Amino acid sequence: MNADELSRIANRLRLDVVETVHDAGDGHPGPCMSIADIMSVLFFEEMKIDPANPKWAERDRFVLSKGHACPILYAALARKGYFPMEELKGLRSLGSFLQGHPDMKKTPGVDTVSGSLGNGVAIGTGMALGCRMQNIDNYVYVIVGDGEEEEGIIWEAAMAAAKFNLGRLIVFADCNNHQSGGRVTELSSLYPVEDKWNAFHWHVQTIDGHDITAIQNAIAEAKKVTDKPSLIACKTTKGKGIPYMEDNNAWHKRVPTDEEVEIAREALKDKM
Ligand SMILES: [Mg+2]
């Protein structure tokens, strides 16, 4: 798929999130938008997955460490064919398999629970080690927020993944400079994040996280490095693509009105 097609899919996912959170009356739309382009490249081009066989042992694994951004994971899974699009309307409803944070025991295509922030890199490290021990020819992809890198377990996992030379672990850091409580750089800033991951002996790249070609190239570079885990620092904008959400932390967790859904549709209609 070319970059334009993947960019259009990313925008389709963005609108899916706006509509899903609107219909559900609850959810985190802003944190979904910054990772839409990464999700498009992973789910619609890069990852070796089979919607007809979600538990296929040889599949690539995906960990959404910032689990509150699950509306976009659910949209990607639905559009890949893991379950019908109508199911998105059940987000956060009692009895739905689309819970407010990902649940591997409920949702086809979800590889791990997440939402308790900070655990995703450790989970991905365990997956990459386990797959290597079983001689599975795959990659493990993790998306971690910038705010959640304040969690100590992130750095325990970073140490372990480097110690075990997990060249098939590729972590995207969604550097949107927002977390629930405000700007990352005004709280316990982890910036520059690249220096820290470098110090932990990871292979580190920095890209524009909304540039499809840059995401594709960074994955290709990461795959060339076989003896180190990879960190791809993605400079992103929280709320990207939805005019009233861009760089506006009020949209971390908020429900769009009918009018705001229409504004989003209008903003994206020629870009999907
Ligand atoms: Mg963030």
Image (cartoon, rainbow, N blue to C red):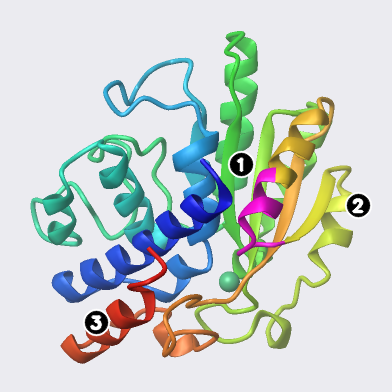
Q: Which residue lies at the image location 41% right of the left edge and 35% below the top edge?
A: 111
The residue carrying mark 2 is 199
Helix, strand or loop for disc 1: helix
Residue under numbered circle 3: 261
Q: Is residue 241 above or below residue 65?
A: below
For the C terminus, the image quarter is: bottom left
Helix, strand or loop at mark 2: helix
**Residue labelled 3 has its Cβ within 8 Å of some atom of ligand 1:** no
Disc 1 and disc 2 in contact, CB within 8 angstroms: no
Amino acid under disc 3: Val
- Amino acid at circle 2: Ala
The earlier-in-sequence mark between 1 and 2 is 1
Separation (CA) of disc 2 from disc 3: 44 Å
Q: Residues within 10 Å of mark 1 (few under 14, many from 20)?
A: many
Q: Say which label, 2 or 3, has the lower sequence index.
A: 2
Place residue 216 in its image quadrant.
Answer: top right
Q: 222 above or below 191? A: above
Q: Is residue 115 in sight in this rendering? A: no
Give the magenta range.
208-216
Residue 226 picture quarter: top right
From the viewer's perspective, tell me whether residue 155 is left or right of residue 89. Answer: right
Left or right: 14 in relation to 78: right
Q: Looking at the rendered structure, which numbered label has been put on residue 122?
A: 1
Q: Nearer the viewer, residue 158 or 156?
A: 158
Q: Earlier in the sequence, mark 3 or mark 1?
A: 1
Q: Amino acid at mark 1?
A: Ala
> Which of 153 and 210 lies nearest the eye of the viewer?
210
- Residue farthest toward the left in the current orientation of the protein: 95
